[in-house]
Image: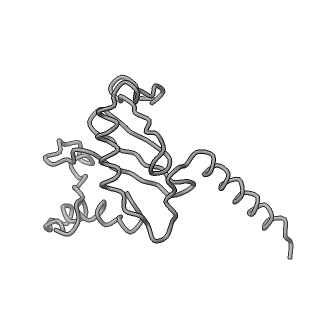
Amino acid sequence: MKHPSDTPRLVLPTAAELAGAPAPTNVDGISILPTLLGQQHKAHHDSLYFEIYEPYFQQAVVLGDWKGYRLGTEDPLQLYDLKTDLMEQHNVAVDHPDKVKQIESLMATEHTPSPHYDTPQHGGKAAKGKKQKEAASLQDLMDDKT
């Protein structure tokens, strides 16, 4: 989900199928009703793209058995083979530059900057520092007894 306003593309196809109505044509979502009923899906996406803005910007793509993940839009991609490493403990990006390039291309294509949040090019220390600053500000608010 790119942004909370994208929720209709996740919910509407499923709700429409439950109601016996045609799916909306202006969303690219797929009904998850077959999954809920324990049935096989007839339609599926080749890849799934996720981005999260809080507590810091993150992107992820699941493409078959591969998962790419990064902080910021230009930080190095971490790549995991979910078939052999479901716990995502072994970053294999160095061994699969073709998959890294393919997933980075999907991230660039799917990302839409939000008018509500900053989209940093790099996450890492900057994101952690921002959260520490926010935590300090929250503590200051809690300590203020006025």
Q: Residue at x 43, y 41 (%)?
A: 69
Location of residue 8 in the rendering, given as x and y in whole percent from the top left corner: 31, 67
Determine whether, in the image, residue 102 is placed left or right of residue 125.
left
Where 23 falls versus 110 (above or below)? Answer: below
Location of residue 92 in the rendering, given as x and y in whole percent from the top left corner: 40, 26
Q: Quadrant of the C terminus?
A: bottom right
Extreme bottom residue here? Answer: 146
> For residue 135, what is the image quadrant?
bottom right
Q: Nearer the viewer, residue 97 or 86?
A: 97
Determine whether, in the image, residue 120 is placed left or right of residue 102.
right
Q: Residue at x 30, y 54 (%)?
A: 109
Where 31 falls versus 38 (above or below)? Answer: below
Q: Nearer the viewer, residue 105 or 137?
A: 105
Where 72 falls versus 81 (above or below)? Answer: below
Q: Residue at x 45, y 48 (%)?
A: 74
Q: How many marks?
A: 0
Location of residue 116 in the rendering, given as x and y in whole percent from the top left corner: 49, 70
Q: Quadrant of the N terminus?
A: bottom left
Determine whether, in the image, residue 9 is placed left or right of residue 131.
left
> For residue 124, what is the image quadrant?
top right
Q: Nearer the viewer, residue 17 or 65?
A: 65
Location of residue 11 in the rendering, given as x and y in whole percent from the top left corner: 30, 62
Render colour scheme: one colour
Q: Residue at x 49, y 53 (%)?
A: 121
Where 110 falls versus 65 (above or below)? Answer: below
